[in-house]
Amino acid sequence: MACRPSRRLSPDVSDQEVTRHPSNTEGTERHVPRPLAALDPHGLLVLSHTLFTCVEQSEIVRLAMRQVSVLGPYRAEAGYLATDDGFSRVPGHDEGVPTVDDARMKELGEADGSVSLPERSWTWAFGLRGADGLLGYILVSSHSGPDEQGHFLLSALVGLTSAALSLTATRAAQHESVVELGRLRTERDTALRQLDTMRSELHLQRTVHETLARVAVRGGGEDSITQALYELTGLSALIEDRFGNLRSWAGPDRPDPYPVRSSTYQEEMLRQVAHEAGPVRVKDRLIALARPRGDVLGVLAIEDPEATADEHTMFALDHAQRSLAQELMHMRELTEVELRLRRQLIDDLLEGTDVPSVYTRAEAVGHDLQRTHYVVVVHWPGNAADDSFTRAVEQATATTATRPLITRRGDRVVLLTEARPNDAAVHAALAHELGTSDGAIGVSTRCESPDGVPRCYEEALRALEVRQNSRQRSGTTFFDDLGLYRILGPGNDLRELEGFVREWLGRLIDYDAGHDTELVETLSRYFDCGGNYDDAAAALTVHRSTLRYRLQRIREISDRDLADVDTRLNLQVATRVWKIILGGRR
């Protein structure tokens, strides 16, 4: 029984007399003590003490049911407690009780009322009620209805039982309230701690966002990103390209020289990091890949040899990686746009375009067309003119001058460059880059203005063709050095012929004009006579010694070796063009 034990008076005490101490006043009456049974003949006072100390409602109902028979010729047939689903019978009543239909209790509608039981002339359901409504029932039966005293006693018992049930419910509610209050306090404390943690995390995250936002507002840049990451984490930050070459470092302990990793190790490391979500630890580093569209554009890392990186560090690294990805993607897009504009520019120059507008377009891509240029055509058998081949040509021809304009024409790469290429150095650099020396390069003469680019392009093609059709097919050929081959091809015009004549006979023509001599005519007759002194002297109507003197002067003024076979051929062709095509004009 989950009730506190009640203190009972000894049976002997109830039969003894309780005397008062005599006072000093004479004649004081002596009070005869009354027995306890006389004070509480039905045991309701003792029962009330037991009921109000009981904590289980079912036990309270059982105690009340046992007390029913003490009150008179009554019998407790059943006891019920109200539940959410109806009524639950309290176990433990006497055996042999006529069956009570529990379902019929709902028919009472929470009111007191008569209940029919076999062999019982009177059965009454006394409702146990509290402040919140019906708490249960006690069914009391008798062979006849109770009289006024019996009704009073039964009502008193029901009242005591209802009060005890209400008290128990109140205690349970208070206990639940205390438990709930404790739970709520615990939840509040937990929520406050979580709020503090969240507030701290938000502050750190806001710091990261604001720092990187300032970097973006100031124009970004790889150095700015690594410096910001170093300031946010306190760990050295670095950026590498996809090949492992250092591009930026912020913080102490920068290696010098920077270690070079093998391409196999680098590719394996990139593959390993790419398979994970977010930054990945590789030895002493935390690494994040900048790959905005799947292509790895760069590697962002922090040095963490002591493994001190926390969630804040990972958050900062992840967001810095996003800033780097945007920066590198922006740079790639700008580079692609610039490359496309530069290719369009040189393509238009090769085809011939409006000169005033081309200066503006060239200035927009950072190229100065006011300077003299050379057209260079490169062909390497077995290498398609793709982006890798184009980059190799651009790197091999790079000088301290302005970056060349470059494009592709079929299987050839065409450049417009300010610097006249060094024939041996450019060819050797390309041979090293491409792994073979079986390639040819053609270089034009100087181009003084944009409208001369198409002509210089034809010159570079002619030089390349001559090189590829010569005995030594690999190497570099300059149009200036073609000699006779400059005019032995399609597409020649009068200007080209005049240029050839001026190259080989210009000094002699100018000398004749200034000194009223006939050195060019003498050289022409000398070649026409097959180099025979007597026939040439006769054709010129001069003495043999005069012819020898003139030939000596020709050697001195032109600085040409008339004994050289190629020189004699070029001079002879030049004199023929001068006399026949140009009409001997000076």
Image (tube, helix red, strand yellow):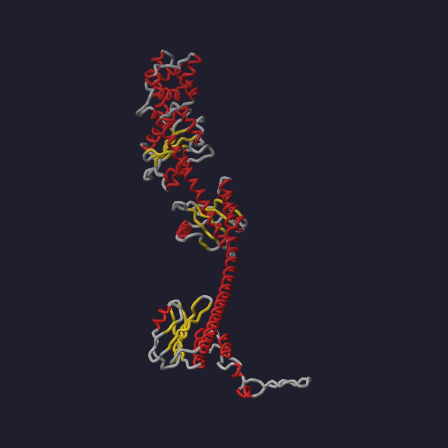
- Residue 207 drawn at (x, y percent): 52, 48
290 or 482: nearer the eye? 290
Residue 3 in view (yes/no): yes
Q: Is residue 507 above or below residue 104?
A: above
411 or 79: nearer the eye? 79
- Left or right: residue 396 versus residue 233 is left
Q: Is residue 435 above or below residue 507?
A: below
- Residue 212 drawn at (x, y percent): 50, 45
- Residue 443 drawn at (x, y percent): 38, 30
Using the rendered view, name the quadrant where residue 135 is placed.
Answer: bottom left
19 or 365: nearer the eye? 19
Using the rendered view, name the quadrant where residue 352 is placed.
Answer: top left
517 or 222: nearer the eye? 222
**Outermost residue toward the left?**
490
Q: Is residue 576 above or below residue 337?
A: above
Marker count (numbered): 0
- Residue 21 drawn at (x, y percent): 65, 85
Q: Quadrant of the C terminus?
A: top left
- Left or right: residue 322 versus residue 30 is left
The residue sitting at 48% across, 44% down in the picture is: 247
Residue 525 in view (yes/no): no
Q: Is residue 522 above or below residue 408?
A: above
